[in-house]
Amino acid sequence: MTQQKSQSAVPANSNAILVINCGSSSVKFSLIKPQSGETLLSGLAECLLSNDAIITIKQGGNKKSYKLAAPFDHQSALAVLVAQLQQLHLVKDICAIGHRVVHGGETYSQPTLITEQVAQTIAQLAKLAPLHNPANLIGIKACQQAFKKLPQVAVFDTAFHQSMPEKAFIYGLPYSLYQEHDIRRYGFHGTSHYFVAKQAAKLLNKPLAQCNLISAHLGNGCSVTVIKHGKSVDTSMGMTPGEGVMMGTRCGDLDAGIIFHLVENLGYSINDVDKLVNKESGLLGVSGLSNDCRTLENAMLYENNSQAKLALTVFCYRIAKSIASYSASLTQLDGLIFTGGIGENSTWVRAEIVKQLGLLNFYLDADKNQTTRFGASGNIATKDSRPCWVIATNEEWVIAEQSAQLLTNLAQ
């Protein structure tokens, strides 16, 4: 999609970008210098649309929380944020707002200046992401009110995966469903996979376009992506974030016949099935205990909880199987990346996954694995193994960087 020059577009090389990640009841935000990645301020507004609505703002080592006033909505949260930015004399540093937008469909493969037409298209794409795109639009409209003179940029989760070939994104369904209704695989976590791939390229000391990698973003939501010559060529999530490996509360890949069985024989409604596969399954469903990996590891290791062990074992097996399957997309593999909350911090999960990847020549150094946590990055493989990196993701920096680059291009 061709971008038109805009009078509101300004170079952003030396300014800060306010990054907004808006959910249905939350707003995550960061004020970032796009060139260096320095975070000037960050925070989270949560429990919006309820009496418990609260916003927490961090700057340097300081953290303050504020109760929100009625109507407890996104606009109320942004009003507090703007007031704090003014008080801290940071508003003058902001040159644009960068928004995380979950679904761009096939329309958007690059960061995009938000116009009324773009907002309408994001709304139309809500049919593909009904839980996410409407919330992203709430944040966009609230920021347009709060920052009327600043350009707003959309950075799409799906954009990085638009390089997938047709053989990777077409489902085995009638082709007309793709042609007429856009039913295909799109993939998500694109900004995360892109960021860690760039960091891996630096560690390999060669251009990203020469790198062949497999990236595992493991958190409450999980996805595995294969990156060939710097571009995504396949990924585990599909038309929605529900496809792929088992996750915190999502079941991942599922025999469609199970859904028919639940509806026809067990009395489930479609809404019941949706709740089951997205909110009651995965680690939570199998363990019957929690979707939090830390809770399950403690239960497995210190309480001998067999269901917690089963949940984690299934989780790791399905991720290892997905990683191994992606070798079919490559003729050369430079290394494996772990990122996301679980990928960056769970030594047990990483070890359990990698011990099943011996055929791909991956072997972990136990000591390096144990010490690479809580923001630490590095290669945790043995000397005779392919590289296996832990790389802390930074999706906000990607959004800031890409927003700044777009505005610079539009101003030229």
Image (cartoon, grey):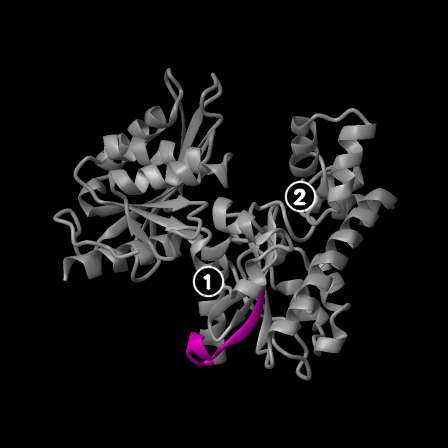
Asked if residue 160 is among those painted magenta in the image, a careful observer would answer no
- Helix, strand, or loop for circle 1? helix
Quadrant in which the C terminus is drawn: bottom left
* Label 2 to label 1: alpha-carbon separation: 22 Å
Q: Position of residue 32 (x, y in %)?
A: 32, 51
Q: Which residue is mark 1?
A: 194
Instruction: Write the start and end of the magenta stretch as one range.
Output: 205-216
Left or right: 364 as drawn, with respect to 155: right
> What numbered label is drawn on residue 248?
2
Residue at (73% x, 44% y) in the render: 256
Left or right: 412 as drawn, with respect to 213: left
Q: Is residue 58 visible?
A: no
Label 1: few (<14), some (14–19) or many (≥20) C-alpha neighbours in 10 Å: many
Q: Position of residue 366 (x, y in %)?
A: 72, 69
Q: Position of residue 100 (x, y in %)?
A: 40, 46
Quadrant in which the N terminus is drawn: bottom left
The vertical placement of 254 against 380, above or below, is: above
The vertical placement of 93 against 77, above or below, is: below
- Which quadrant of the structure image shows residue 223? bottom right
Q: Position of residue 374 (x, y in %)?
A: 57, 55
Residue at the left extreme, as displayed:
7
Asked if residue 208 is among those painted magenta in the image, a careful observer would answer yes
Q: Is residue 143 visible?
A: yes
- Helix, strand, or loop for circle 2? loop
Left or right: 215 as drawn, with respect to 38: right
